[in-house]
Image (spheres, rainbow, N blue to C red):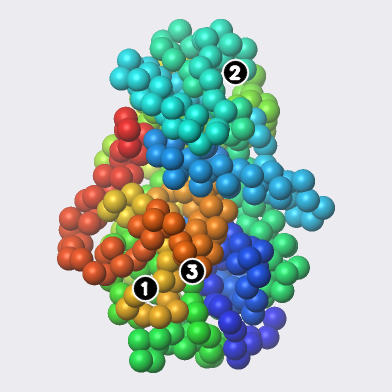
Amino acid sequence: MIQPETAGIVIVGGGAVGCGVAHSLAAAGYDEILLIEQQPTLAAVTTSQAAGLVGQVRNSLDRTRLAMWSVKTFSDLEEGDTARPGWRQVGSLRLALCEERVEEFQRMQAVANEAGLETRFLENHEAASLWPAMQFDQVKSVLWCPSDGYLQPSDLAMAYVARARAAGVRFLTGTTVEKVLVENDRVVGVETSEGRISAPMVINAAGAHAWHLAHSVGLELPIVPVRHEFFVTVAAEGLRPDLPVIRIPDARLYLRAETDALLCGGWEPNSLSLDPREFPLQEPAPPIREDYDVLAAFAEQLAPQFPQVSQLGIRSVFRGWPTFTPDGRFIIGESSRVNGFVMAGGCNAHGVSGSAGIGRHVVESLGDEPSEYVMSLSPNRFTETGWDWTEATALARRVYEHYYAIDH
């Protein structure tokens, strides 16, 4: 499309979060929305490298409700007549390998009960009937959530796009936002590789480049890209797409079937991060080489429950730079320092699964009475307090490394 000269809202970033925010804003009645993506296609960077797992069982009520909203949205999208997200509501099994984890599952079920989310504990033989190729002899407890599942991340983004476009949202790809234009502490537009666009509001959903975009308006935010990897094996006996998602937090692992193959990923105990100050807004984040030592460690951790993993060749490796924050919470809402500059970043590996809920939170943050929880996600918590990059990076990496830690 020809680049417009004006817009009411410019969203920067065409991944699941940006597309989800566009969908949510359009559904809420906002108009003159323009989404700008640097890559030639949407959902081409971190979103394309996501595993697509969608879990609702959390340790906090607010995060549980956000995940439940996302699941409701995915179900609605899947029932539509246009593009669908490939949503498979196959349920999930969460396996405990120690007594402390069993106690955590009990606390998580109490949160789920308060949120109105259905869960129940299964006997090992019941779990084995749902995943016959998995061994449960060392498993001490299994928490089942029947409404969980997984989807195809790129398909989800396209489902958002189809509905947003039908509501009048415009999408501009292959265009770089070089800086956000500010006058008298108020957003007035963006400067792009193709020229200027005037707009009173910019929403920063730029993923690994979210720090750069905030920095262009004078905001320093601790948004740390941290490496994440998973692998998909060759076809394996006993695997089919209707199997539940499995999480083994004591082994730092998650897995699901990818058609007739195994998808397995995990959370590295010694993470690798980027300093966003060391690469520019106009260029992609540094490429990630497959780390087969890390992937082999995932397979080794999985072997007690799924012995055949050691016999399966790896067909493909996916890796990306999801962004993490020092406190493990999203950064959502308008900055008090720059009117019209709105954050939708620091997604802490929930960019795909939480995209619908994040979009809803952005809409709520722009309203007259956002909840206390949404207000707590404001970028002001970092711009109005002191912090340093060394400590912030260590804390953000710790959030990643302790993703499956008890009560995390």
Report which residue position mark 2 lands on.
Answer: 131
Residue kind at label 1, given as amino acid type: Ser
Neighbor class of circle 3 (other Cα within 10 Å; few <14, some 14-19, many 20+) is: few
User: Which is nearer the N-term, disc 2 or disc 1?
Assistant: 2
At a point 45% along the width and 79% down the height, the residue shown is 340
Taking the spot 75% from the left edge, 68% from the top edge, the residue there is 166
> If you read the primary sequence from the N terminus, does the residue marked by circle 2 or circle 3 appear first?
2
Q: Position of residue 11 (x, y in %)?
A: 54, 72
Q: Are marks 2 and 3 in contact (CB under 8 Å)?
A: no
Q: Position of residue 28 (x, y in %)?
A: 63, 65
Q: Label 1: state its secondary structure.
A: loop
Q: Is residue 236 left or right of residue 183?
A: right
The residue singled out by tag 1 in the image is 335
Q: Position of residue 203 (x, y in %)?
A: 48, 72
Which label is found at residue 368? 3
Kindly identify the residue that appears in the image at 63 percent across and 25 percent down.
Answer: 243
